[in-house]
Structure formats: C-alpha cells, structure tokens
C-alpha cells in the first residue's frame, strides 16, 4: 500500500487526468492508502464515490434535504480528520455509513426535543438511480410512466411513516442493498436485532402500502 501511495505521488507531477483515472480504478482501501500517503486528490475520489449515496441515505432518514446536505458535509469533515484511525482491514463503506447513520440519529434526537419541529412530517424522496427498484423506464408508454411514478410516490409515503429504527434498517437493506452484517455494524446493534427490525419494517411497510395499491 505504501508503494502504491508513492506511485501516485510520483504521478502527481504529471497530468491530473491520469491520476484521477487511476484512482477511479482502485478499491476504496487502496484510495485511502493513497490519500494517507500524501495524495490529496484521493480524498476527492472518496467524496465523488460517496457524496450522492450518503446524501440519499441521510435524506431518506431525516426527510430534510438541506439539512441532509449539511450532515453529509460534516461526515466528510470527520472522515478527513480521522481517516488515519480507520481500520483498513474493515470495509470503508461500512465505516463511512456508520458516521452518517450516527449523525442522522443525532439529528432526529435533537429534533424530537425541539417543540417547534416535533410534529414535522418526514417526507423521504428517493433518487431512482440510487436504488434497486426501478420505477421508470423511458421506453414505456406515458400511461405506464404515470403508474410507475404514482407507485414511487406511494412507496415514498409508506417508508416515511415507518418508525425511525425500522426505517433505517429498511432503507439500508431494501434501498441501499447493504448486507445484514453491514447494517449491524452501521447501526450498532446485533444481527438478531437487525433481522427483527427488518421483519417488522417489512410487515409495517406492507400494511401501509396495501390500501394505496388497491
């Protein structure tokens, strides 16, 4: 890894384009090593990889896009400051999602203590390209597109009504595609609790969406 970092530092003296192209071809752990070796553009690569995904995740969790953008910025500030402490035997994605999850939880806790926002409705908005469920196909007929957009709205409404802990595991599993083990590490609960919350979330989601799709 140290040799890889030195290679990038040597490349740094040439064109920026080959450096960024090569960084894009690396695994997260190698990009982290390059950054810790002194190549600042490696951190930009991490931001490019995770900024959109984290924004969608935090937005789905707290329901406020402007605040989600602030929190994601805070995520990267913390990553930048503490990347040297990251255990590179672990997955970088799990580590950064854990930071984002903790900030989102803190936001919801602080919000619940504020009487001005206690009764705010969380309206989660999901980006089509960032989730496995595809609601739109540009090659389908206009009436099909309308039905799929309507379905998306119903899904968004139903997910936003799930309790916070259930919504978090539901989003991580069903929309982010995280494994049970990753979700356990991100949320800080054991595997059994993850599965229990997910089962309850799925049941609640089915109950919520059923009247809307009849």
Image (tube, rainbow, N blue to C red):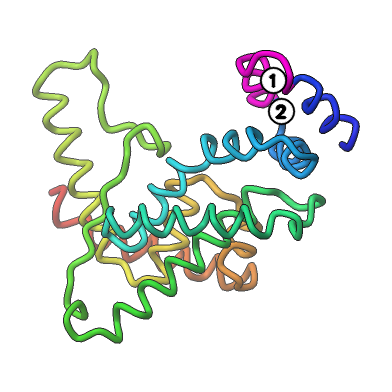
Mark 1 Cα-neighbour bin, 10 Å: few <14, some 14–19, many ≥20: few
Residue 34 shown left or right of residue 123 in the figure: right
Residue at x 32% of width, y 39% of height: 127
Label 2 secondary element? loop
Q: Looking at the picture, how far across and down is residue 182, in whole percent?
A: 63, 56
Q: Quadrant of residue 152?
A: top left
As drawn, is 127 to the left or to the right of 45?
left
Instruction: Name the residue carrying label 1.
Output: 22
Position of residue 24 measured from the top left corner of the image (x, y, whole percent): 63, 25
Mark 2 touches mark 1? (CB < 8 Å): yes
> How many C-alpha atoms fall within 10 Å of the one at disc 2: few (<14), some, or many (≥20)?
few
**Nearest-to-viewer mark from 2 and 1:** 1
Q: In the image as oriented, which residue stretches furthest toward the front?
A: 13
User: Residue 141, percent across and down?
Assistant: 14, 16
**Start-end of magenta stretch:** 12-25
Q: Mark 2 — residue?
A: 26
Q: Is residue 51 left or right of residue 94?
A: left
Q: Nearer the viewer, residue 165 or 125?
A: 125
Instruction: Decide: is 71 above or below 51.
Output: below
Is 93 on the left or on the right of 154, as rendered? right
Q: Quadrant of residue 97?
A: bottom right
- Give the quarter of the image for residue 187: bottom right
Q: Residue furthest right?
A: 3
Name the residue located 85 percent from the left edge and 30 percent from the top edge.
6
* Callout count: 2
**Residue displayed at 32% across by 66% down:** 204
Inter-mark Cα distance, 2 to 1: 7 Å
Q: Is residue 153 above or below residue 161?
A: above
Q: Residue at x 38, y 79 (%)?
A: 109
């Amino acid at each position: 890894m140290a040799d890889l970092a030195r290679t990038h530092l040597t490349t740094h003296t040439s064109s920026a384009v080959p450096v960024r192209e090569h960084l894009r071809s690396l695994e997260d752990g190698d990009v982290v090593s390059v950054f810790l070796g002194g190549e600042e553009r490696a951190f930009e690569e991490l931001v490019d990889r995770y900024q959109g995904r984290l924004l969608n995740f935090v937005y789905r969790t707290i329901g406020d896009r402007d605040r989600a953008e602030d929190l994601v910025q805070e995520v990267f500030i913390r990553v930048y400051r503490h990347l040297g402490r990251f255990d590179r035997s672990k997955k970088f994605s799990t580590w950064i999602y854990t930071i984002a999850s903790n900030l989102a939880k803190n936001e919801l806790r602080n919000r619940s203590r504020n009487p001005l926002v206690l009764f705010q409705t969380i309206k989660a908005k999901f980006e089509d390209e960032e989730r496995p469920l595809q609601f739109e196909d540009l090659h389908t007929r206009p009436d099909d597109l309308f039905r799929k957009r309507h379905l998306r709205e119903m899904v968004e409404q139903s997910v936003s009504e799930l309790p916070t802990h259930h919504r978090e595991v539901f989003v991580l599993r069903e929309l982010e595609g995280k494994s049970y083990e990753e979700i356990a590490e991100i949320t800080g609960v054991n595997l059994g609790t993850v599965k229990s919350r997910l089962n309850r979330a799925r049941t609640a989601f089915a109950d919520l969406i059923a009247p809307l799709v009849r």
